[in-house]
Amino acid sequence: MNEGSDKFSYRNKEISKKLQEQVNNQRKDGKEMYDNQKQFYSSEQQLIQYMRRTNRKELSFEDCLYLFKTEKERKTFYSQLKDFSLLKRIDRRRGGKNKIYFVLKKT
């Protein structure tokens, strides 16, 4: 049982490392939004822009928390969560726990 949790934590570390590399590459390319521009975008718009820049079909809740690092950003994200109109929330059972993912709604 401990071996499975070690594999799971190792996988999470790999994902976090890849996500950090993507963010660092975006900063180098100048594609990251500036902090003063973030206030003009809703949390949903920021997530969609990030998904498009990184060519991702879905984002996990952990990815969202990584993108919204400060307490103020996270509070805004939580308050706007129920108002998302372009992103669909999907609950999946992974490793005995429910995981939350966001995907673009089909129009």
Image: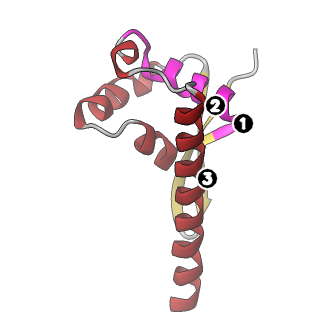
77 part of magenta stretch: no
Question: Which amino acid does the dot numbered 3 rest on?
Answer: Arg
Which quadrant would the N terminus be assigned to in this image? bottom right
Q: Residues within 10 Å of mark 1 (few under 14, many from 20)?
A: few
Along the polypeptide, which appears first: circle 3 or circle 1? 1
Mark in the foreground, 3 or 2: 2
Describe the element under mark 3 as helix, strand or loop: strand
Looking at this rendering, what residue extends furthest in the top direction?
40
- Name the kind of residue labelled 2 in the image: Met
State the extent of the magenta-drawn residues as a range: 40-58
Query: Cβ–Cβ below 8 Å for labels 1 and 2?
Result: yes
Q: CA distance from mark 3 to mark 1?
A: 15 Å
| Quadrant location of the C terminus in the rendered image | top right
Q: Residue at x 43, y 16 (%)?
A: 42
Q: Quadrant of residue 94?
A: bottom right
Q: Residues within 10 Å of mark 3 (few under 14, many from 20)?
A: few
User: What percent of the width, then of the height, locates residue 57?
Assistant: 72, 36
Question: Residues at badges 3 and 1 in contact (C-beta under 8 Å)?
Answer: no
What x and y, as percent, mark residue 77? Answer: 37, 29
Instruction: Name the residue at 53% across, 43% down.
Output: 24
Q: Which residue is mark 3?
A: 92
Residue of label 1 = 57
Residue at 39 percent of width and 9 percent of height? 40
59 over 98 or under it: above or below: above
Q: Which residue is mark 2?
A: 51
Q: Is residue 61 left or right of residue 54?
A: left
Mark 3 or 1, which is nearer the eye?
A: 1
Instruction: Say which label, 3 or 2, has the lower sequence index.
Output: 2
